[in-house]
Amino acid sequence: MASRGSFYFVPLLLLLILLLASPPTAALDSSKTGSSDAGNATAAAAAARLRPGKELLKYKRIRALLRKLNKPSLKTIKSPDDDIIDCVPSHLQPAFDHAKLKGQKILDPPERPKNYNFTITGSGNGRGGEVVVQAWHATGEACPEGTVPIRRTMEKDLLRASSLRRYGRKPARRGVRRDSTSSGHEHAAGYVNSELYYGAKASVNVWSPRIGDPSEFSLSQIWVISGSFGNDLNTIEAGWQVSPELYGDTNPRFFTYWTTDAYQETGCYNHNCRGFVQTTNKIAIGAAITPESVYNGRQFDITLMLWKDPKHGHWWLELGSGLVVGYWPSYLFTHLARHASMVQFGGEVVNTRPSGSHTATQMGSGHFPSEGFDRAAYFRNLQVVDWDNNLIPAASLKLLADHPGCYDIQGGSNSYWGSYFYYGGPGRNVKCP
């Protein structure tokens, strides 16, 4: 039987070992975590020493993930919204951690689809199609040529995450369907699925919808989809998103996403895994976009185009007029390595049913499509890329609202906007309990 003195000796010895083994807070590289994270680091380290088991393990995992995500930078820019933008040498961005990109050079953008310049623009009253920039551009600083701007992941971002293992990924979903009614994800979208598709283009106005619960998000995007709606689903996604859990605020942010197994184990948002290869030094994926549309006032939209390079098969992304952001290498995908079988445009929210009722998280402007221009969110100039690399109007567009009492959709066509629709809603209301 152990002596009474040994009971005092063991905890004291363990505490001494932990104090010696635990790196001091100052050892957290400010170039990777930022001075604003010093308090978080101190708190995490203190918690780890007080509860050396589970807390210490989490602390070490956070440190390891920060080292993996945040790459060495040549320049750092502090955004007015408190984001830190690191100017990372192009060949050091996270995508180059992939074995197939080791030693490879970044590709030059391919030719645009035919009819690329034939896009109807404007709203008919001069208030649509405004240029949208990012918050960090207000500093007047820019990343040097040969680097890419990457929003730094902070320790506080990881501490907010519901799961470190799945940080930067959408919640895993089983038995995904297009309407996703059984997964807590709700949509109001237009889609085409009668042909083979090699890209898509549209303009969408930017809003800051209210989020009812911090674990929920609201987004508006283009999906390029292939495979069944089972575990082999391939998607490429781009648009704007409000996600307090991922970004720590309610600003609308430019984002990308991809998966090859229906959001199970592959893919991620932005640069949170080895995937998207960024080529521009002008846009930071995951950074806030500004200004936003104003209810009954000025409307601001962004134009997105995704298209498959006919020569190499990679999927490229363009934001605005002529600004190529980068590409998803074809080797990431199974079905999308060949083509897409569906293109979808629209909004998505997560409904966790807080307090047992439908969420109050808004989609789009938070107003129903019946309110029209200046008040409702819209997608306009809906186009797809065909087998011969032609950019053509999205024909046979189908409209779908999972829960029209919560979020609805109404479409149309005219000489100013081509094929378009209004979409969105407030979430919980008398028709959506």
Image (spheres, rainbow, N blue to C red):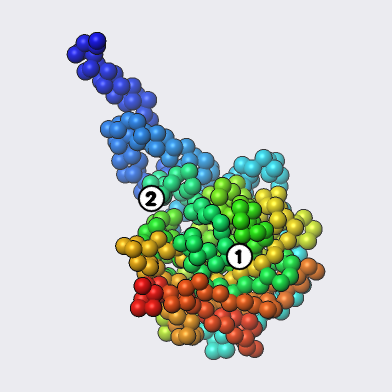
Q: Nearer the viewer, mark 2 or mark 1?
A: 1
Residue placed most toward the observer, 165 or 429: 429
In the depicted structure, whether residue 159 falls above or below residue 28: below
Report whether residue 122 is seen. Answer: no
In the depicted structure, whether residue 90 falls above or below residue 220: above
Residue drawn where x is 56% and y is 47% of the image:
265
Residue that label 2 marks: 160
- Give how far across and how far down residue 209 sits, in percent: 42, 70
Residue drawn where x is 63% and y is 82% of the image:
419
Q: Secondary structure at mark 1?
A: strand
Report whether residue 333 is seen. Answer: yes
Q: Which amino acid, by three-letter code, is at mark 1?
A: Trp
Q: Residues within 10 Å of mark 1 (few under 14, many from 20)?
A: many
Q: Residue furthest left?
A: 4
Q: Are marks 2 and 1 in contact (CB under 8 Å)?
A: no
In the depicted structure, whether residue 45 falls above or below residue 324: above
Residue 223's disc is: 1
Q: Secondary structure at mark 2?
A: helix
Q: Which amino acid, by three-letter code, is at mark 2?
A: Arg
